[in-house]
Image (cartoon, helix red, strand yellow):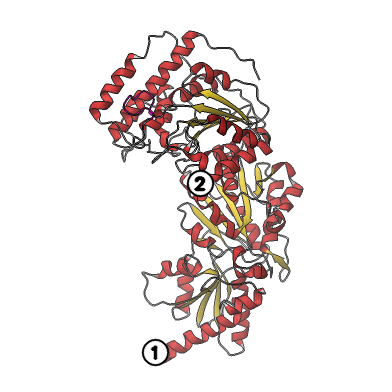
Amino acid sequence: MEDYHKPDQATVQALRNIAHRLRINSIRATTAAGSGHPTSCCSVAEIMSVLFFHTMKYRPDDPKNPNNDRFVLSKGHAAPALYSMWTESGFLKESDLVNMCQVDSALEGHPTPKQQFVDVATGSLGQGLGVACGMAYTGKYFDKASYRVFCLLGDGEMSEGAVWEAMAFASYYQLDNLVAILDINRLGQSEPAPLQHHVEKYQRRCEAFGWHAIIVDGHSIEELCKALTQPRHQPTAIIAKTIKGKGIPVAEDKMGWHAKVLPKDMAESVIRDLQSRILNSNKRLYPATPSEDAPPVSLRNARMPSAPSYKLGEKVATRKAYGMALAKLGRYNERVVAMDVDTKNFTYSEIFKNEHPNRFVECYSAEQNMVSVATGCAARERNIVFASGLATFFTRAYDQLRMAAISESNINLCGSHCGLSIGEDGPAHMGLEDLAIFRALPTSTIFYPSDGVSTEKAVELAANTKGVCYIRTSRPESNIIYNSNEDFHVGQAKVVCQSKDDQVTVVGAGVTLHEALAAAEQLKKERIYIRVIDPFTIKPLDAKTIMDHARSTRGRILTVEDHYYEGGLGEAVCSAVVNESGFLLQRLAVPHVPRSGKMSELLKIYGIDRESIVQAVRKMISSSANAK
């Protein structure tokens, strides 16, 4: 690290002027919009000025340049401060600022990737540092480049547990290219933050988590310049004591001003006062140019080199097939990376780790942080990221998943041990809500493979599908039902059992697909024939195939799923046929919180086993006959 050179007075004054202009622009933008957080912007003015025009190295005309330092605004409500910096750099126009939050503006109330200089959406507090960890991990261990990652947090979000998950991750992996700046402005939304201005307590907490923590006056240009240039051998936390509403006399360090804009006459008065503080300076500051040492990366065409090697009738758990497929994909694209939450021996991501140890990231028992790290690793299209854990515990990370979708992130999640089929572990470990939560995400694709062949195809397709992809895998072994050369596509179902005499179309996936096939064999003995469909993807659902085949079975559809009734396969099929006439749909699903037991017992007790399917089919046929 270069030695610290104290900036000359002309530079200090130029940085002060930039801070004053940030306050002016933030007030002007929020007053014009009638919305925003001007006091939260004013507390970070000097921090942003020093970061963007003294510390960070980036090309202002090329915000996505892979060599640029990264910046994550975790306190996303200070978005106008970020927009002001890109106005100062020349990337935005001042006219863009005063149009902020309008329906035709790319500048939203909180940062979103509609702007090139925003890598990830923020605004749900506590998530920015985890994303920054993913970026810093990529920079240090995958790109092996010199770019640094800076994350600005507010003191309110320091109450979020996700922040401390990220703190632990960063120190464990010695992310010395990561700098967190804590804006300790004392005031939260409705009352003071718990530690208020006790900056030494923040320092001790950060140090306890393995960070180098430096206390500074957050409005001192000189102190910020020095702190941000210190040599580093571990992640650094700059604990900046600031005044909320700094520069707005009526609001400085006062409650009741969070998320309130200044009335127009007050704004004009404050702006005049701030303009008077801008002293003439002939010095124009420009960001430093980054080193060109980030390697070129191409994520296109991440393809399997050969077909799956499974044989019909062979038994393999889809969770194991996932690990084997991921390791295979990783052999032919060095930007495929995997991570897990200390469940790699359950999800079988350990197969990838054993083969590609330098591309495996252990996130330990911190699902929220893993999803954020995955989002950071995938930013700027640097990596193809697969993150795995038990299906049920992705519920804990739902807000991170939601923000990944808003961020237009391309991440792949694998949830193992879904449904009743985990048996003895009981309801705490049964993923019975996961389809519902992933279906609700606007950018999601949901794969539900039923054998090893379809699992391998799902992994390959997910690697090449935009948005948040979810692969649902099961614990028990199941028969291989597809030939290795079977072709799979997103949104294309498979008909795995049919005859010209079929009377009911049964749609099942995973464990219940195999139960449906067993039911079909049992019903044949009674000369009752059913058509069995594997949807492969729950979202998008191949509604056309299901409806076309259901019409051949007199409109009768039976769905059966290892999931609660709400939000899963059955409701997806219901949504597909709701505006169509001539269909009779029955659903089998887990009706309430289950208990521990053997898988076969649980499937039977909760009505989703082969016998339950047989009975439901008989009833549908009988009801139709009686209706006639």
Quadrant of the rendered image containing residue 19:
top left
Q: CA distance from mark 1 to mark 2?
A: 49 Å
Residue 483: x and y, percent? 67, 66
The kind of residue on which mark 2 rests is Ala
Residues drawn in magenta? 245-253
Q: Is residue 362 within the magenta segment? A: no
Residue 242: x and y, percent? 46, 26
Disc 1 element: helix
Q: Is residue 353 above or below residue 152?
A: below
Q: Residue at x 50, y 80 (%)?
A: 504
Q: Which residue is mark 2?
A: 404
Specify whether 357 is left or right of 436.
Answer: right
Q: Residue at x 61, y 61 (%)?
A: 487
Does label 1 or label 2 sit earlier along the sequence? 2
Q: Which residue is mark 1?
A: 627
Residue 481: tell me if it is visible. no
